[in-house]
Amino acid sequence: MIRKKAVVAALAATTVIAAAGMASAAATGAFSSAQGSDLSAAHQSPRGPKNVIFLLGDGMGTQEITAARYYQGVQNKLNVDRAKYTGFDTTWSVKPAAKPPYKPDYDPDSASTGSSWATGKKTIDERISQGPSSADNVPGTNYATVLEQAQKRGMKVGDVSTAEITDATPAVLSSHISLRGCQGPADMAACPKETKAAGGLGSIAEQQVDHKIDVLLGGGRARFEQKITGGPYAGKTVVDQAKAKGIQYVTDANGLKSVNDGKPVLGLFHPSNMSLEWAGPTASLGKGNAPAACKENQRPSNEPSLADMTTKAIKLLENRKGFFLQVEGASIDKQDHATNACGQIGETVAFDKAIGVALDYQRSHPDTLVVVSADHSHTSQIVGEDASGSGLPTGWSTNLTTKDGQTLTLTYGTAGFGGDGKAPVATAPSMQHTGAVVPVWAQGPGADAVLGTNDHTHLFKVLGGH
């Protein structure tokens, strides 16, 4: 979740992107009907889904989900494999510019991709549900999100993540800001025009509380313990702001269990990102370590699992008007950046358990649409474990002993060479995202709309945006 970029404005169909005359469908955010972005009547039930659950595996490209599938044993299916429909989405963002046409950026970050499905429009990297502009530090136009539209229809809404809840993916639903790093009141130096003191909407944490989301669960407690600098809550913390608005506040697994559905709930279970589920050998250059199994069940018991947070969120959100819920498995991406194979796979397996919770609910509530995807692809690659000589990986590798008793070798190589471009640095740096398409799975009313190859902006309508 390290990179940066920019947004697309509303154009009716195709937009010219390059001087060479390349056609792009980045306009309103969705591709043109010729490319399959419009949802025909055949794609929807007569009334559409009552409930929508969108599950996002951050950085969970095809290699990442396959690594988790193989580690668990090739004869064992993951929960996500139960979904009836599968397609692919392109994820490109756009580059900063004063006006359209905006040129494509093929390797996006989580802020721009999240804004794509949250608003149906393209934007630059680092931007949260706000349109493109000439530079990162120049605010763009705020775009309405699918969560905001669901609230206007009377639906309950929820946002769950294993990251700081102010991180890019959870933030795109309930906040609008030019730079994703402006997460708490004390983090607003790069967003001076958007502070509450300057008459803006404030930091991501402040906006999330102002939105009065019915269920907001994840990490990032330290952001909410920062003091507000403007408006009616100046001098108070964001937690104080939440409590003043009648929001229930909990900080551990037992507290979450005791929450009832009478009031909105804010659950912050770690000062930063929530603890990892698995641990294991570190990656090293070339062939890597002797094969070893991952150590499972590493998350402290006072932090709820993603599956438990998903279960509780659904229970709290159920109502006769329906609900919209986003659930993020966030640290797949973060551990891919860190070349931590066991951390990455453990978070993917934990995310898949949350997918199982959603699909089980959908089976007993057929008016619920479940959609699963990733925001962007990432660096890990499954390679042969018996390479030698010139066949050795040039990046950092980890060898794992799978549940089948075989060696699974993952290598990471999208960053790491020195300034001379000849020799890799001694310690693995943060790896980069990649620009490959990501899978999309779906089950329930309108699920077949994900079939084929679409763009991420297409998900906005699939999820109920308009």
Image (cartoon, rainbow, N blue to C red):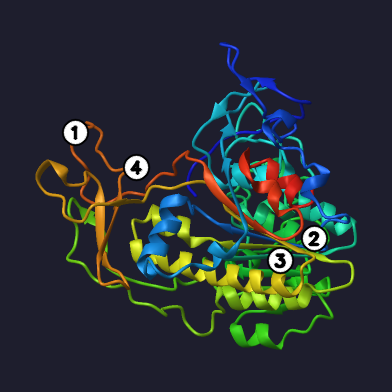
| Residue that carries the numbered disc 2 in the rendered image | 210
Of badges 4 and 3, nearer the viewer stands 4
On screen, residue 411 versus residue 92, left or right, reads left
Cα–Cα span, label 2 and label 3: 10 Å
**Mark nearer the N terminus (2 vs 3):** 2
* Visible residue check, residue 384: yes
The residue where tag 3 is placed is 238
Distance of label 2 from label 1 (alpha carbons): 51 Å
Q: Amino acid at mark 4?
A: Thr
Q: Which residue, as the protein is rendered here, is positioned at the far top?
A: 20
Q: Position of residue 176 (x, y in %)?
A: 72, 47
Q: CA distance from mark 4 to mark 1?
A: 14 Å
Q: Residues within 10 Å of mark 1 (few under 14, many from 20)?
A: few
Mark 3: secondary structure: helix
- Mark 2 and mark 1 lie on one chain; the one further toward the N terminus is 2
Amino acid type of the residue tagged 1 in the rendering:
Lys
Q: Give me the disc on residue 383.
A: none
Q: Residues within 10 Å of mark 4 (few under 14, many from 20)?
A: some
SS at mark 2? Answer: helix
Disc 4: which residue = 414
Q: Where is residue 393 drawn, in percent x and y?
A: 21, 46
- The residue that mark 1 highlights is 422
Mark 4 lies on a secondary structure that is loop
The amino acid type, in three-letter code, at marker 2 is Asp
User: Mark 2 and 1 residues: CB-CB less than 8 Å, in contact?
Assistant: no
| Badge 4 or badge 3: first in the primary sequence | 3
Mark 2 or 4: the one toward you: 4
4 or 1: tag closer to the N-terminus: 4
